[in-house]
Image (tube, grey):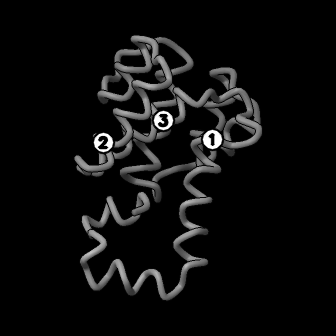
């Protein structure tokens, strides 16, 4: 089972699980894409524990308890700091640059159509460089 199966709540006994496997390149490609965001070869200075904490936060914003539990396990294995645990729990009273990062992540998770150039400028003002901003927006 991959993350998409878990998110969709399907099991190996379900017809949809079998149907997805008719195109294994899509299943594999989806998982490779997910891993490239969470565990890229070059993390651009956005550490794996930050990436997983953000993924956990996004799963919570999308009310996905299965993915939240999966990311909780992953995050625990990465030795998160208390600020990252707070970020993952959905807290907003965070120090910079985490406060700006979570505002951006919340925006693009919940209302991506409202994202504007000035939101990118806020990330840059918080100290993120262009590759970090692109990686964060993925």
- Image quarter hosting the N terminus: bottom left
Q: Nearer the viewer, residue 33 or 73?
A: 73
10 Å neighbourhood of mark 2: few (<14), some, or many (≥20)?
many
Residue on which disc 3 sits: 52
Residue 88 appears anywhere in the view: yes
Badge 1 marks a residue whose secondary structure is: loop
Q: CA distance from mark 3 to mark 2?
A: 10 Å
Asked if the residues shown at circle 3 and circle 2 are in contact, with their CB atoms under 8 angstroms apart, the answer is: no
The residue that appears at 58% across and 69% down in the rendered structure is 28
Sequence order check: which comes first, mark 2 or mark 1? Answer: 1
The residue that appears at 45% across and 12% down in the rendered structure is 81
Q: Nearer the viewer, residue 34 or 99?
A: 34
Residue 40, how many percent across, how many down?
69, 43
Sequence order check: which comes first, mark 3 or mark 2? Answer: 3
Residue 62, how many percent across, how many down?
29, 51
The residue that appears at 46% across and 22% down in the rendered structure is 99
Give residue 39's mark: 1
10 Å neighbourhood of mark 1: few (<14), some, or many (≥20)?
some
Sequence order check: which comes first, mark 1 or mark 3? Answer: 1
Q: Residue 130 lies in what quarter of the image?
A: top right
The residue that appears at 52% across and 50% down in the rendered structure is 115
Residue 125, how many percent across, how many down?
66, 23
Residue 103 appears anywhere in the view: no
Q: Is residue 106 above or below residue 53?
A: below
Tell me if 57 is positioned left or right of 32 in this view.
left
Residue on which disc 2 sits: 68
Q: CA distance from mark 2 to mark 1?
A: 17 Å
Give residue 66's mark: none
Q: Nearer the viewer, residue 96 or 118?
A: 96
Residue 80, how many percent across, how many down?
46, 18
């Amino acid at each position: 089972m991959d993350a998409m199966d878990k998110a969709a709540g399907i099991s190996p006994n379900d017809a949809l699980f079998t149907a997805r496997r008719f195109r294994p390149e899509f299943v594999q490609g989806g998982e490779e894409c997910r891993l490239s965001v969470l565990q890229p070869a070059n993390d651009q200075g956005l550490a794996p524990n930050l990436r997983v904490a953000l993924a956990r936060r996004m799963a919570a914003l999308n009310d996905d308890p299965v993915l939240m539990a999966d990311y909780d396990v992953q995050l625990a294995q990465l030795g998160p700091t208390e600020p990252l645990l707070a970020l993952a729990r959905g807290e907003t009273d965070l120090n910079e640059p985490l406060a700006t990062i979570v505002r951006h992540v919340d925006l693009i998770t919940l209302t991506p159509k409202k994202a504007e150039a000035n939101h990118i400028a806020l990330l840059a003002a918080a100290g993120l460089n262009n590759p970090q901003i692109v990686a964060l927006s993925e």
